Amino acid sequence: MDKTILPGRVKGTLTPPCSKSYAQRALAAALLCEGVSQLRNIEFCNDTRSALRCIETLGAEVRQEDASTLVIRGGLRPRGDRLHVGESGLATRLFTPVAALCEASIRIEGEGSILDRPMRMMVEPLRSLGVEISDTKGHLPIRVRGPIRGGEVTVDGSVSSQFITGLLLALPRAAEDTTLHVRRAVSTPYLDMTVDTAKRFGIEISQRDYEEFYIPGGQRYEATDFAIEGDWSAAAMLLVMGATAGEITVGNVSMLSKQADTAICTALVRAGAVVIHEANTITAAHRPLQAFEFDATNCPDLFPALAALAAAADGVSVLHGTSRLTYKECNRADAIRDEYARLGIEVDTSEENVMKIRGGAVHGAVVDSHNDHRMAMSLAVAALRADRAVTIRGAESVAKSYPEFFEALEQVRS
């Protein structure tokens, strides 16, 4: 789908969808309960639907109470031998260890960009925990047969924290205690989210400096009532929209959230935007913006939003952490460089792990989302400052995390 964005100003209040990171973790935890949990404020982007499909395949009974509430009776009793994760990296790396709790052989398969993303980091750790596992040259499809047992295991955390999340949620149900050693952990705020979710369902996990996690085995997940908070990844894009093209207030978010992307507020302040924190809202308003420096190693999903912010700032902004962008829905460093060049913005990725963006005027053009939801949103935000219309190819990719994004943008045009 092509989407044409006209330049213009924005002003208003928007509420982002729920955090799909929290939603997927909560869905997995609800599956691992034997009782009935209620998940509130849940919304159905493609990634959340993938996780929902996984828990139903693995035995959960799900009833939709209303538009944003699910009632879930847990219980790990697989109804099939194939787990389809769609294009969700988190669902893949989360539900592979969960499926490995089962004695049945289960094949994990997906579609689209997920087939190119690396999964080899799961193989040896799961094998050392007693799981029979086979992969496809380090990629999906993967087949596992459990039950996973506890013990002592080392995991490489340098590519993604998502597999560690899967282990942290699955291993409390293992028969034995586990000591999990993590090398070079990245995106540590996401591990905080995992431990926080597990705690809300009655699970104890202790950790030391994100290098060692101790997970007692034989624990029982307790059914709970869980309200999913707003998604800071989506909120970041809306706040950058306000900072570069007017004023936006974002609802149902808190700076006390454990989500990594709260860090967008630091970047906004460094760039010179007005940022106002209130109880459950954050407002960002435009002021003349200057170049800034920011390390996004632990919050790589912010890069597309940071690119739109840097494009509007005077001077050369320096963003660190591009090594985290290779294995996303696309190679986001290359995509940002190439598509922003079409808009007239110079992006230099020649230095290892660094992206330099020279702010300036945005020119109308035809650009490509690379089938990446965050790229589509980033280009749309940048287009508000263009001298003429910008057409985004593959704009339907926003359905992965924020299906109503374009409607929200039109709602706040001033």
Image (spheres, helix red, strand yellow):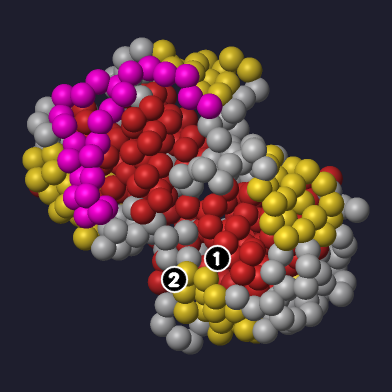
Question: Residue at 77% of width from left, 51% of height from top?
Answer: 248
Q: Is residue 38 magenta?
A: no
Q: Is residue 310 above or below residue 65?
A: below
| Left or right, residue 357 beside residue 104 | right
| Left or right, residue 150 beside residue 387 | left
In this view, the residue farthest toward the bottom is 350
Q: Is residue 371 among the parts visible in the rendering? A: no
Question: Residue at 80% of width from left, 55% of height from top?
Answer: 247
Q: Quadrant of the N terminus?
A: bottom right
Span highlighted in magenta in the image: 202-227
* Residue type (three-letter) at the residue carrying disc 2: Gly
Q: Main secondary structure of the magenta part?
A: loop
Label 1–label 2 contact, CB within 8 A: yes
In this view, the residue farthest toward the top is 35
| Left or right, residue 138 beside residue 272 | left
Residue at the spot of label 2: 321
Residue 46: x and y in percent read: 56, 41
Residue at the spot of label 1: 303
* Residue type (three-letter) at the residue carrying disc 1: Phe
Residue 116: x and y in percent read: 40, 60
Q: Which is more toward the observer, 346 or 394?
A: 346
Q: Is residue 13 above or below residue 395?
A: above
